[in-house]
Image (cartoon, rainbow, N blue to C red):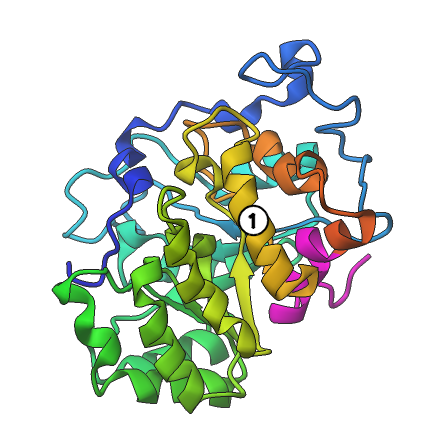
Amino acid sequence: MSEILSRRVFLKRVGLLPCAGLATAAAFGGKDALGQAAPADAGSATSNPTGESPIIDAHVHVWTHDPQFPFAPETKNPPARDATAEQLIALMKASGVYRTVIIQVIHYRWDNRYAASVLKRYPQYFRGVARVNPQDPAAPDHLSRLVEEDGFHGVRISPSGEASGDWINGPLMPPLWARCRDLKVPMTVLAPVTRMPDVMRLADQFPDLTIVIDHMADCPLNKPDELEKLLALQRFPNLFVKISHTWSLSAQAYPYLDSQRQVRRLYDAYGPKRLIAGTDWPLVEPYCTYTQAIDIARFRIDFLSTEDKRWICGLTAARVWPLLDGAS
């Protein structure tokens, strides 16, 4: 259990709104789910303010209630409904999304078989990021198998900010990070902003490794000084930041303008070529629909130019994961 980072969203996972993400702005008569006016072209599979560049959702989860893919014993309160690849593909098509990156959901812990089956069935839609037990000395070898045999493209670790997450500073981390480097796949880190100095120490050891920080390090908006810990990582040219979780950090309604101020600080530090948009579907659904989540970066952040959107909504992710190979 010490590997898990507690988040407000995960505490709500059992109460996901049933099929909320299936609704688009059009279903609300030109307004979004909160009754706000939506852009005229929001939610259209053909509307794309990024020009010819594809829209890539770099952060989703999938799972299914299937005895072939049982949840981990530690998952005492599994989600009430499925979030399958097929459901996600339907949402992608309705929202004009070209590719997505599946992040192994914590409900399965280190059993990546369902995500692997999805990657095998739908390689034209998905790339995958696996999980391995970071406290297992064999984790690097497990990662090699997941990459070389199951088609994953990277691994995610999630140390908590408490003492239970101090393994990030332990002797098992450098071998795992070195294996990512050798496999040429990114290391994705879900951790609170207080862990960013620990990430910095590892990044210093592996300057050639691509690193992705999830969800703006979930930096609380009421602690703006803490964001400096994430901004300090800007000096690593191979480090990228997902600007997801605008919705979970916010105290406001859609489109979460208070969170967008934090996005602006990251934009000023990292630039659009190192920022990545992602929905965190289906965990986003209690807050807004899938299309609305896509539209935050696509339409709702006013300071982004069309060129910025090309990178944040797709091309940056394509630098990190091989998402444009064989594009039709």
- View extreme (top): residue: 29
Q: Is residue 285 visible?
A: yes
Identify the secondary structure beneath mark 1.
Answer: helix
Most extreme residue toward the front is 225
Number of numbered discs on residues: 1
**Residues packed near mark 1 inside 10 Å, few (<14), some (14 to 19) or many (20 plus):** some
Q: Is residue 219 left or right of residue 38?
A: left
Q: Residue at x 36, y 62 (%)?
A: 112
Is the N terminus in the top left, top right, bottom left or bottom right quadrant?
bottom left
| Residue 114 image offset from top left, x and y in percent | 39, 55
At horizontal 60% and vertical 49% (from top left) the residue drawn is 264
Q: Which residue is mark 1?
A: 263
The quadrant of the image that shows the C terminus is: bottom right
Which residues, given as a range, are shown in magenta? 311-328
The reply, left or right, for residue 295 in relation to residue 174 is right
Q: Amino acid at mark 1?
A: Val
| 125 lies above or below 44 | below
Q: Is residue 9 above or below residue 200?
A: above
Residue 191, can we see it?
no
Picture coordinates of residue 85, whole percent (x, y): 51, 44
| Residue at the right extreme, as displayed | 52
Residue 274 versus residue 285 in the image, above or below? below
Residue drawn where x is 50% and y is 27% of the image:
288
- Does residue 90 lie above or below 313 as drawn? above
Q: Where residue 199 appears, x then y in whole percent?
A: 37, 74
Q: Is residue 120 left or right of residue 145?
A: right
Asked whether residue 78 is drawn in magenta, I would say no
Q: Is residue 318 magenta?
A: yes
